[in-house]
């Protein structure tokens, strides 16, 4: 993880401390460079690394954790330039209180 990612996780963890219970879904994504199976594995590894970092900061058992690697299947921009491919290489964190 880059330092900016670690800082974002710290900020999220501070916000999440006020939530009583929640489902946390960590989604990993890639661009379309490489083959589908490699991108699926890479996206899962991205999700796992963020989950591990977040769990270091949030030690509460009041959260249900889920990791998903979507590979290149959910781009947010066309994979037609380096800038757009960079946008597609991401991790999204969904917090659903219950």
Image (cartoon, rainbow, N blue to C red):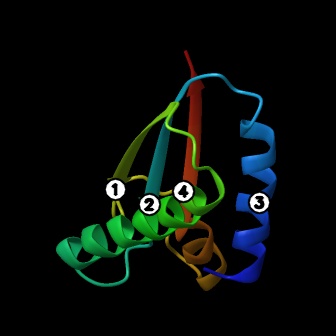
Q: What's the CA distance linking mark 2 and mark 4?
A: 16 Å
The earlier-in-sequence mark between 4 and 1 is: 4
Circle 3 residue? 10
The earlier-in-sequence mark between 3 and 1 is: 3
Residue occupying image coordinates x 77% and y 75% = 4
Estimate the x, y position of residue 68 in percent, counting from the top left: 34, 51
Residue occupying image coordinates x 74% and y 49% = 12
Instruction: Say few, some or many: other residues with alpha carbon within 10 Å of mark 1 (under 14 / 14 to 19 / 20 or more).
Output: many
Whether pointer 2 and pointer 1 mark residues with C-beta atoms closer than 8 Å, the reply is yes
Instruction: Say few, some or many: other residues with alpha carbon within 10 Å of mark 3 (under 14 / 14 to 19 / 20 or more).
Output: some
Circle 2 residue? 28
The earlier-in-sequence mark between 3 and 4 is: 3
Estimate the x, y position of residue 51 in percent, counting from the top left: 49, 59
Whether pointer 2 and pointer 4 mark residues with C-beta atoms closer than 8 Å, the reply is no
Residue occupying image coordinates x 77% and y 29% = 18
Camera-side residue of 3 and 76 = 3
Camera-side residue of 14 and 77 = 14
Q: Is mark 1 on a helix, strand or loop?
A: loop
Q: Is mark 3 on a helix, strand or loop?
A: helix
Circle 1 residue? 70
Q: What's the CA distance linking mark 2 and mark 1?
A: 6 Å
Camera-side residue of 49 and 31 = 49
Residue occupying image coordinates x 38% and y 74% = 32
Instruction: Say few, some or many: other residues with alpha carbon within 10 Å of mark 2 (under 14 / 14 to 19 / 20 or more).
Output: many
Residue 55's label in the rendered image is 4
Q: What's the CA distance linking mark 3 and mark 2?
A: 19 Å
Q: Is residue 32 left or right of residue 36?
A: right
**Residue 77 visible, this angle:** no
State the quadrant of the C terminus.
top right
**Residue 96 visible, this angle:** yes
The earlier-in-sequence mark between 2 and 1 is: 2
């Amino acid at each position: 993880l880059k330092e900016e990612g670690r800082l974002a996780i710290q900020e999220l963890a501070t916000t999440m401390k006020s939530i009583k219970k929640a489902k946390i879904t960590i989604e990993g994504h890639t661009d379309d460079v490489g083959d589908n199976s490699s991108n699926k594995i890479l996206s899962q590894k991205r999700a796992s690394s963020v989950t591990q970092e977040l769990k270091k900061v949030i030690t509460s058992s009041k959260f249900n954790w889920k990791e998903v690697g979507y590979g290149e299947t959910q781009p947010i921009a066309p994979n037609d330039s380096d800038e757009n491919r960079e946008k597609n290489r991401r991790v999204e964190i969904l917090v659903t209180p219950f």
